[in-house]
Amino acid sequence: MATAVSELGPMRDVELPEGVIRYHETGTGPPIVFVHGIIANADVWRGVVSRLSDRYRCITPDWPLGGHTAPMRPGTDFTLFGLADLVQRTITALGLEAPALVGNDTGGAICQAVAARHPEKIGSLVLTPCDAFDNFLPLPIRHLQVFGRTPAGLKILAESMRLRAVQRLPIAFGLLTRRPIPAAIMASYTGPLREHPTTRQDFARLVRAISTTFTKEAAEGLRTFPRPALIAWARQNFFPLAHGERLAGLIPDARLRIIEDSGPFVTEDQPDETAALIDEFLLGKARQ
């Protein structure tokens, strides 16, 4: 199972030292690179990309976070800053000049680490509700760090998420959206963990490397981030609004916008509003 929709454009591969990153590309114009969270893939961005690709070059990789099918090589660094380096190397390998970097969920934490460690590689930063500070992982899904450490635990986890009733539980995807995620999209998110032992191996390495030490360090690095930033947050408790406000206060050139009637996956609940805020932000940046 790979990404399930056509709005993202054709799938391509880019070879990195860590392995192959599969990505979609569509549209022309200033480049945007999107970063999703764990047990998800590029399909998270389908509603946003379909609304932006007439004006922007939209690049949506399947990052190795549990919803991917291309395994990473042994020795890959799955810490937050290791994943930030992976994003940075992808940007370089694709020859992108100062793209906008847009993150959600765990992907937003990775974007913070990119902004802290590689600010010269990106032209602007967009953070939607995401892990930050001491909220990595959020409490309702910290069981993933237990189940994810062993092949047996991961297999149980993956098989359980076949069930729509389980998918809507708070310990799964239930707190991430106000509305159910379409079945085909859920299958694209959760299928790789069931179907690919190498995906489970990567995910186990990922959850072992999760630590708030890294999110706190990344947040401190944002104090000197020299580019414009948009913090487009929703009123929910999984990734508290107070964290969005705090991130906006840390970044010297940041603005905070609130997306109403949405869970943390603003791209699922409010794709129109999310795309409009990104477009407005990037148009304003272009006029500066």
Image: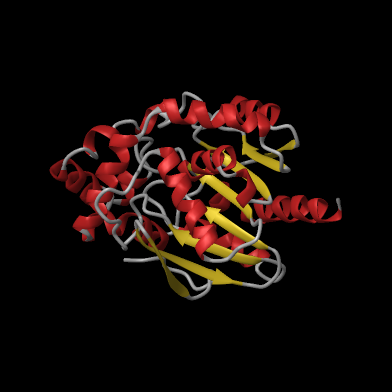
Q: Give the colour scheme of this rendering.
A: secondary structure
**The residue positioned farthest toward the left in the image shown:** 152
- Residue 251 on image: x %, y %: 69, 32
- Residue 256 on image: x %, y %: 72, 36
Q: Residue at the spot x=71%, y=43% of the render?
A: 227
Q: Is residue 231 above or below residue 30?
A: above
Q: Which one is nearer the viewer's eye here, 210 or 152?
A: 210
Q: Residue at the spot x=36%, y=34% of the render?
A: 210
Left/right placement of residue 233 relative to residue 172 reads right
Q: Quadrant of residue 78?
A: top left
Q: How many marks?
A: 0
Q: Is residue 45 above or below residue 133?
A: below
Left/right placement of residue 136 relative to residue 246 reads left
Q: Residue at the spot x=53%, y=66% of the render?
A: 94
Q: Which one is nearer the viewer's eye here, 207 or 265?
A: 207
Residue 37 visible somewhere in the drawing: no
Q: Is residue 251 above or below residue 205?
A: above
Q: Which one is nearer the viewer's eye here, 98 or 257?
A: 98
Q: Quadrant of residue 276?
A: bottom right
- Residue 216 on image: x %, y %: 50, 26
- Residue 25 on image: x %, y %: 54, 70
Quadrant housing the N terminus: bottom left
Q: Which one is nearer the viewer's eye here, 123 or 70?
A: 123
**The residue positioned farthest toward the bottom in the image shown:** 10
Left/right placement of residue 243 relative to residue 157 reads right
Residue 149 visible somewhere in the drawing: yes
